[in-house]
Amino acid sequence: MSDDRFTPCNPQEISSLFLFEKLSPEQLGRLCAEGRVERFDVGPVYTEGDPATCFYVMIEGTVVLSRRVGGDDVEVSRTSQRGVYAGAMQAYLGEQVPQTYTNSMRVTEPTRFFVLPAESFADIMRDWFPMAAHLLEGLFFGSRNMQRAVGQRERLLALGSLSAGLTHELNNPAAAAVRATATLRERVGKMRHKLAVIAQGPYSREALAELIEIQERTAERVAKAPVLSPMEAADREDELTDWLDDHGIQEGWRIAPTFVQAGLDTDWLEQVAATVAEDILPGAIGWLNYTVETELLMDEINDSTTRISHLVDAAKQYSQLDRAPYRVVDVHELLDSTLLMLSGKIGPGVRVVKDYDRSLPEVPAYPAELNQVWTNIIDNAVFAIGSTGGEGTLTVRTAREGDRLLVEFRDTGPGIPAEIRSRIFDPFFTTKPVGEGTGLGLDISWRIVVNKHHGSLQVESAPGDTRFQVLLPLTAPESETAQEPA
């Protein structure tokens, strides 16, 4: 660093800067004694994340402040106003918080600064403005604690909503399983009675063996039953009803729908009629009816319990309770579990389209927190669609963009007005009615994506087409440090 970069500190010059205009000559003298005037050529002054060693006040020139978003530096301020300041502005907090630069500063023309070492700035704040230092300290920690508390409430509200949705989703298959179990108990009782009737009837050992064999083949047929259209099912029911009536089977119209659901047709019944004697055909059909009903009920119970198991697995995937907090994940699994958890809230009026690129690699991430991001964005999309009548489309798309993975949420809601678009990521800003939103959902999401995953979160919006785009690095940074979003 050459000596011509430094010029003597002139108390009169620095007193013209608005920060120092009310100071006494003695105070100005101390500033000049402990600080320095330094000129910087075009280029960087300090870098975000480095130890905050100095407090800078611009005397003349132009400064640009930027923040790191993913792998890019995003300009947040550019000014030539004398007296603007940056750098170690929280030095008065001392070791209570990490003293690092929270942004990067560069100059676009030769620029002079009054530069004060961070230690001197902290001492001066405590000596000259002790009450102000205490107030600022209380404001800093109070604001951070309030954001954390409200952020925790945001998470709890989301969890409550998810729990209600999960309870609703679990109730349907659980109730179906209970109903099917009760009906199955009744059918098994009737089957035992029918078996007793058959055993007491004039059936030979060979006839009973044939009935058992037909029962086994019928059960196999049920397991492979095709899915018919309503028209096909109705036509087949008519055919079966006619066949049963022609063969003297009472109430064939009651039996026919069950046989159709099981995949049985008149060709199958002809095989049964050819196998058993004509006098035992009605009993055989009744016996097969109970067999089919029992198989269908067991299938229904199996489907319901599988659905319950799937929902529980989705809840575990969503919460990540039994997983490492930071690991390599398939974002599609996270998206699917979140959509399933939110299905009750999404409702039937919202059509969900999954446009996934399944060839994408897994990415290093904090999965539980990404699920929170998906939840916040989907919740906002559903609210937006609901504000236009409750019907619309939510499209979730994944793709690769260079060395990053894109997750895009597109909704057909009314869009975000241009005048508030720049504020949607601000803490406590919300367009939802009082009591329905804290205004922290997108702020928390931004912190999780940008600060914790070194990615980016951006929005594009027009009426009928709003897109929130999350870009995540495909590889982990060299040294990953876990940091809770404030």
Image: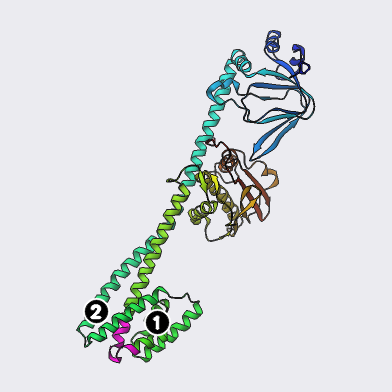
Taking the spot 49% from the left edge, 77% from the top edge, the residue there is 230
Q: What's under tag 1, amino acid-wise?
A: Ala
Rendered location of residue 321, percent (x, y): 43, 45
Image x and y of residue 440, in percent: 56, 40
Question: Please, what is the dominant secondary structure of the magenta stretch?
Answer: helix
* Badge 2 amino acid: Leu
Q: Is residue 181 visible?
A: yes
Q: Position of residue 42 (x, y in %)?
A: 77, 28
At x 35%, y 69%, the residue is 298
Q: Is residue 355 magenta?
A: no
Marking on residue 195: 2
Residue with the mark numbered 1: 256
Sequence order check: which comes first, mark 1 or mark 2? 2
**What colouring does the structure picture have?**
rainbow
**Looking at the image, residue 418 lies above or below residue 49:** below
The secondary element bearing badge 1 is classed as helix
Q: Which residues are magenta?
A: 274-286
Q: Say what secondary structure mark 2 lies in.
A: helix
